[in-house]
Image (tube, rainbow, N blue to C red):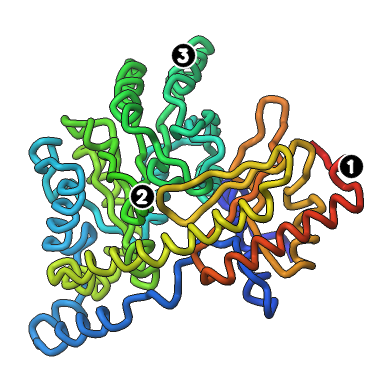
Amino acid sequence: MPPLPLSDRSGRTTDSPITFFIQKALETPGLISLAAGLVDEGSLPTADVAAAVAAIMADPAAGRAALQYGSTQGLPSLREKVLRHVCAADGVTPGDIGLSPDDVVLTTGSQQLLYLLGEALFDPGDIVLAEAPSYFVYHGVLQSHGVRVVPVPMDDGGLDVAALDAKLADLKRRGELGRVKLVYTVDYFQNPTGLTLAADRRPKLVEVVKKYSTEHRILILEDAAYRELRYTGPDLPSVKRFDPTNEFVAYASTFSKPLSPGLKLGYALLPSDLVAPVLHLKGNHDFGSANLAQHVVDRLLASGAFDRHVEELRRVYRAKRDAMLAALDAEFGDVPGASWTVPGGGLYVWLTLPPGVDAGPAGPLVPAALEAGVLYVPGEFGHVPGEGGELPRNECRLSFGVADAAGVREGVRRLRAAYRTLERAGARGLAAV
């Protein structure tokens, strides 16, 4: 048979690297998964959702409205609530930052929004600057669009804004600034590192992007998926807060992490001139996200159930985060050169092992960990190759989302046992760097 002629985009699109690890977790009884960033199953709001659905269906008019098609942009009352929710967290009114409900778009999870923005903005060969390491699933989206990712280093304060300035200056010198379309940041409790963009860097990030928006406007994509999952410290203002004319920042978030991924509902606060292009493309995708899910979330926000659930999630995840940090201290505290982040929220801890340890997907630690009964995500996935093709391979993303506190502790103990097998075998010295 002759081959089926697939598109260039299809040829650029590959399976997500996390698929193997999710499949392993599902197929292997007794395996403790510190890998996929899934949510705590026991805390899913079954009673609240049941009550909301029952209330909707008890009212024939409300039930018919929820079961009918909705609009491409999303339920108006929910868009208003989303806008108030974000602005209240930032201590501003919508008018303070040039926003109205017309600038809010509801999407089928935040992942759809990430893809739609790419469709609206990117041509093959365009450039996105992203944190190193960054959210590797978004790297797949960018690869599908034919985009080149330029990594920007991070430190304890998140994205290094001075380094971003230097990267943009270098691209300008090379005559490539015209290809730069976007700066991407997961600025609250980042996936994969758990780091948060420091308060004083947030306005500076907008200033830097404005500085280089000379030939065209460069957009900041602020991925705030984990903002509500805060366990220590104050809620920092969003980067969007420092975009009073609503021109430079697209704020993206989701109800998957703070409520339920099964409802599959995300949202974005967009510059006004980006709304129509995104909606035109979204109309080609689905004519609007699931209407019933929007009505359910609208009820949960109106009743206060959403806020109560977020508080419960903070309690649940705080305990599991603390269990992971204590276990890492107990198990890896005596390993010279090992370190890990201490996230103030989110679902992830970033473990850095001594230089020379290969924790990558082709390295010896992955099979040793599987043999010990634990799964982690190789940190290599969060990076794009440097100019010399090099990738750090001594990093691991550990998630405390799924396992309970006892499982988290046991998972870290198993990971240390796997590491010991490498030490005994002398694999450290043989690992590729």
Q: Nearer the viewer, residue 254 or 219?
A: 254
Q: Do the numbered discs 3 and 1 sit on residues whose CB atoms are within 8 Å?
A: no
On-image quarter of the N terminus: bottom right
Q: Residue furthest top?
A: 173
Mark 2: secondary structure:
loop
Quarter of the view holding residue 106: bottom left
User: Dot 1, crowdedness within 10 Å: few (<14), some or many (≥20)?
Assistant: few
Type of residue at label 1? Leu
Q: Which residue is mark 2?
A: 232
Type of residue at label 2? Thr
Q: Which residue is mark 1?
A: 430
Mark 1: secondary structure:
helix
Residue drawn at the location 51% of the way across and 32% of the way down: 154
User: Dot 3, crowdedness within 10 Å: few (<14), some or many (≥20)?
Assistant: some
Q: Nearer the viewer, residue 350 or 153?
A: 350
Residue drawn at the location 53% of the way across and 44% of the way down: 341
Front of the two marks 2 and 1: 2
Disc sitting over residue 169 in the figure: 3
Expressed as whole percent of the image width and height from the top left, the position of residue 429 reads: 88, 40
